[in-house]
Amino acid sequence: MAQRQEGEVDEKTWVYDSSVDHKGRLPLRASTGVWKASLFIIAIEFSERLSYFGIATSLILYLSKVMHEDLKSAAKSVNYWSGVTTTMPLLGGFLADAYWGRFSTVLISSIVYLLGLILLTMSRVVPSLRPCGAGTCLEPRKVHEVVFFLAIYLISIGTGGHKPALESFGADQFDDDYSEERKKKMSYFNWWNFGLCSGLLIGVTVIVYVQDHVSWGVADIILSVVMAVTIVIFCVGRPFYRYRKPMGSPLTPLLQVLVAAIAKRKLPYPPNPSQLYEVPTAKKTQGRFLCHTEKLKFLDKAAILEDNGDSAEKQHSSWRLATVTNVEEMKLILNMIPIWLSCLPFGICVAQASTFFIKQGATMNRKIDNDFLIPAASIYSLAAIGMIASVTIYEKILVPVLRQATGTERGIKILQRIGIGMVFSMIAMIVAALVEKKRLGVVEKNPQTGSLSMSVFWLAPQFVILGIGDGFSLVGLQEYFYDQVPDSMRSLGIAFYLSVIGAANFLSSLLITIVDHVTEKHGKSWFGVDLNTSRLDKFYWLLAIMNMLNLWVYVIVARRYSYKNVQRRAAVAVADCYNGDGVGSMA
């Protein structure tokens, strides 16, 4: 009894989750991690999202007005850039987990991001790099195009390391095995997105207003200064952070499981899963133990101990024998693939908000009291408002009620939360189709003024509904991919979430190309030179139908999904998972 009390006191004093403090020592719980560290991290996320959305939401307008690209080309350019920006984190996440560590990755990538912003500023301020010598030009200088695209893709590279490493670094500040911090961690992803949306909101209002009414160059200077300041703030928080040491390539153990399972494919399964190999507790220095599951049993053969007379060294080779935990980690990754694929149609819907939704707003009446003209990209702020409202209501009202109703820490499962968001995205596409149909009707009645007689606030419902859906699905996807990947792949987990949006942007461009080709072949293309000669309403209906069909697939996949089953603290044997001692995942 005395030893147990001593252990509880020790756990309250020190953090035993494989993390270290800034001097490489065991972290002191009272002075490191949790919100005192996370606030520094959320500050630099605010700055990054301010810059990203200040650039992304007005990019299609810049490409149209300054670069003089047509609707299809501009939309594809934005989708390609967004796609690269949200798939680069796969590389950044790998480097953070395997070699650099999350803090170093965030710092290096933030400096690269800042260099991209400075180069972007130069492309709009330095006379020899500006689009034109003076006034409006019909075609921008080639040197401007080169420097401009180099700058925004440099920002993509910076985002590639910044996004996966920073979010997972923030989540690392909470100890999963300490109940008080575990509950706070569930709130962390909600408040992380609150900070994200705050940056987004200012980016698409203040920054976009400066772009429209002052100059693009001044807006870029503001973004560069804010990023530089928050990099300093991030470094100031260094003594308060908890750090995870990089453990080498997280992909190697997964490959070893596959090789070992294939090599021992002819061996019979043991009668009891407790006979499968697991590393002794005393030798387990990194990560947590996972309990054995019955799915994908073929992989279990990698953990079978052979009795064939080979030397102990050969039998215990990592390429010949894997632990149950490593096998279960491989199962986790394979189980994620159907979830990842079934989220892509949702990502395609999200991609429309920063392309066609913005272009719609540019063709409508954006005046308030005949004096103030709302920048077209600022309409995106309605999505941020919807997301902030959604996250706040979920955190403050729904979660407490659902916890009480279900008796679980989370309230509802992560995949249920994602599914709710998908329903909202489908509704947003239906509303967008109806609004666009009405806008085209106004254009048809009065071709000279077009849709300028129609208020831009007709777009408010589709933005707000999509924002509410993001509050469920995007936050849920962040939490899902961070929580369900192996502990050694947390940054890659966030990268997997971002890759859903990145792949969806590429698919959106591909879908535009396919629809354009098919509809042009059978009459008139749905994508004309401008919006008034296009049929975006039909395209939105297509997306709504695709999402409705996909939702059925997602529900089937989600119902069959097995959540990560973790042994809190270290399990002494695989058998413990079958004796009622194992604690399942928070999900």
Image: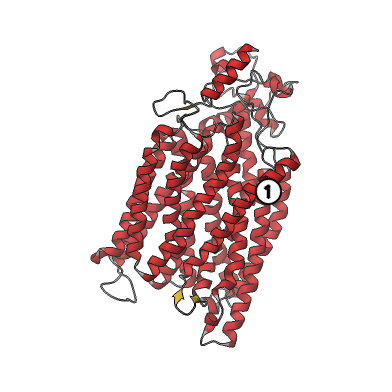
Q: Residues within 10 Å of mark 1 (few under 14, many from 20)?
A: some
Tell me which residue sits at (71%, 52%) in the image. Answer: 553
Could you tell me if residue 160 is visible in this image?
no
Q: How many marks?
A: 1
Pinpoint residue 189: horizontal percent, then vertical percent.
56, 44
Pinpoint residue 127: horizontal percent, then vertical percent.
24, 66
573 with respect to 34 (left or right): right
497 with respect to 335 (left or right): left
Q: Is residue 103 above or below residue 277?
A: below
Circle 1: residue type: Leu
218 and 535: which one is in front?
A: 218
Pinpoint residue 261: horizontal percent, then vertical percent.
62, 28
Could you tell me if residue 377 is visible in this image?
yes
Tell me which residue sits at (45%, 73%) in the image. Answer: 70
Quadrant for the N terminus, please: top right
Q: Is residue 577 above or below residue 38?
A: above
579 with respect to 131 (left or right): right
Tell me which residue sits at (34%, 61%) in the image. Answer: 148
**Under tag 1, what secondary structure?**
helix
Tell me which residue sits at (72%, 31%) in the image. Answer: 294
Q: Which residue is mark 1?
A: 398
Pinpoint residue 345: horizontal percent, then vertical percent.
62, 57
Q: Is residue 312 above or below residue 238?
A: above
Quadrant for the C terminus, please: top right
